[in-house]
Image (spheres, helix red, strand yellow):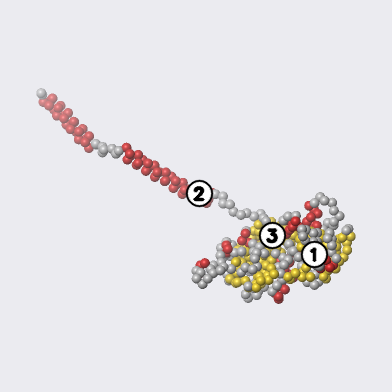
Amino acid sequence: MTDKDNKTDNFEQEIREMYKERNTRLSFAKPKNKQSGIWLSSLWLWLLVAAVLFAGLLLFSLYLPLHSTIVQPTFTTVVTDKESTLLSDMRGLSSSAVIIFSSQTVSEKTPLWQDVYLVNKALGLGLVLSSDGWLVTTNQVITDINKNYIVTTLDGKLRPVKRVVKDPAAPFIYLKVEADGLTPTAFRRLNEVSQGSLVVAQGILGQGEEVGLAVRRVSALLPLNIIKNNSSLIKKSEELSDIILLDSGLPDQYLGAPVYSLDNKVIGLAGQSTAGVEIIYPLEIIDQAIDQLFTKGTIERVYLGVNYALLNSVLPFTNKETELPEGGAWLVSTGNQSAVVSKSPASVAGLKANDVILYIEKDRVSGTRSLAYLLQSYKIGTKVNLRVWRSGKEIDLSVTLDKISGTSVEK
């Protein structure tokens, strides 16, 4: 073998050794079993899904407040620039509103935090009538005069109710608390309120920390029973059912809330109909009762003793031909109730079934000034003249008004 051949063999041997060393360094670790590989792949897949979900929720939470539609109560009342200026002045209205609760039964062991009257537990609201503690609310707020109640003015003072008086003719309940220096408010006359007038209801906000003002317009002035059913069109002469209808409902927490005209005079208290808190019980009808309430602690109303339907509410909605006049209080019987109550002032004066009372003195009986409403403007014992339609003729009758008394409960 020549030197050349030896060099070639040595060169090939070096190359073999070099590749052997390279292959040893680059040798791979023993592969994992098949199950371990599947478990690791699944873990990475779940982590990826979780990351995608988290990113989606984060993006949704940032996007929603900026772009979603949040449903909130809306009202149709439109306020002019002039009315808006007047409303801004009412923000500083000194409150005569009170919040009414059922009294809680607690013991000396009751924790202090449980003996708390929360606004969301309130029965409703009322109004201060006198500086010495006479208040008024509706019979929708106080449904049982025999129970115990407690009120708080918006200054946060709690006052137990010492006396409850139920009005025998109007939908009002009167409460007496021990107080001094409360702030009463002047009344707005019903004939000074017209359709379309702007009114402001004074309620409480959800947390009870400040006064809430809800703006509405007067939709109509009408007898309450016209919005119920046919049978309820028949009313007693001692049933004060005149109301003011609002253009849209108030929040539920405004039940019993004082409702003001723009000159800060109170028109009435917010009441509930079948459609919600959308009516006002006018407070003008308690004028004659307030003096008795303050001096005697009770309520007495004038009594005539008839059942009637307002022709203004009946005739426009019937096709039946009749000889009855276009308006007035038509004396009719319903169920077990006679048109004229036996031995009543009306019976003594000679009123009969199917008579139509057209006038009390010079005041015309109409849809907005009902028989009951006009009667309550007179004092007990007053002799008044009635202009009556009877069988196609008008006659005059004289009647002396008697009295009915309200129910009073001392606490």
Report if the CB atoms under discs 2 and 3 are less than 8 Å apart.
no
- How far across and down, in percent of the image, does residue 257 sit? 65, 64
Q: Quadrant of residue 351?
A: bottom right
Q: Which residue occupies 10% across, 24% down?
A: 2
Task: Name the mark on residue 279.
Answer: 3
Asked whether the beta carbons under mark 3 and mark 1 sit within 8 Å of each other, the answer is no
Question: Crowding at label 2, few (<14), some or many (≥20) Cα neighbours within 10 Å?
Answer: few
Q: Is residue 25 left or right of residue 377?
A: left
Q: Earlier in the sequence, mark 2 or mark 1?
A: 2
CA separation in Å, label 2 and label 3: 42 Å
Q: How many marks?
A: 3
Q: Residue at x 70, y 63 (%)?
A: 281
Tag 3, which secondary structure?
A: strand
State which quadrant residue 302 falls in.
bottom right
- For badge 1, the amino acid type reads Val
Going from N to C along the chain, the mark reached first, 2 or 3, is: 2
Please tell me which residue is depicted at 81% across the width and 71% down the height of the picture. 382
Kindly indicate the quadrant of the structure image that contains residue 174.
bottom right
Q: Residue 353 at what x, y percent from top left?
A: 83, 60
Q: Which residue is mark 2?
A: 63
Rounded to the nearest angstrom, the CA distance separating label 3 from label 1 is 31 Å
Compared with 1, 292 (above or below) is: below
Separation of residues labelled 2 and 1 (CA atoms): 71 Å
- Label 3 crowd (10 A; few <14 / some 14-19 / many >=20): many
Q: Position of residue 34 (x, y in %)?
A: 32, 37
Measuring from the top left, give residue 270's x and y in whole percent: 67, 62
Q: Is residue 326 left or right of residue 123?
A: right
Marking on residue 341: 1
Q: Amino acid at mark 2?
A: Tyr
Mark 2 vs mark 1: in front: 1
Does 292 sit left or right of 347 as displayed?
Answer: left
Task: For label 1, count other residues whose C-alpha is less than 10 Å away and answer few (under 14), some (14-19) or many (20+).
Answer: some
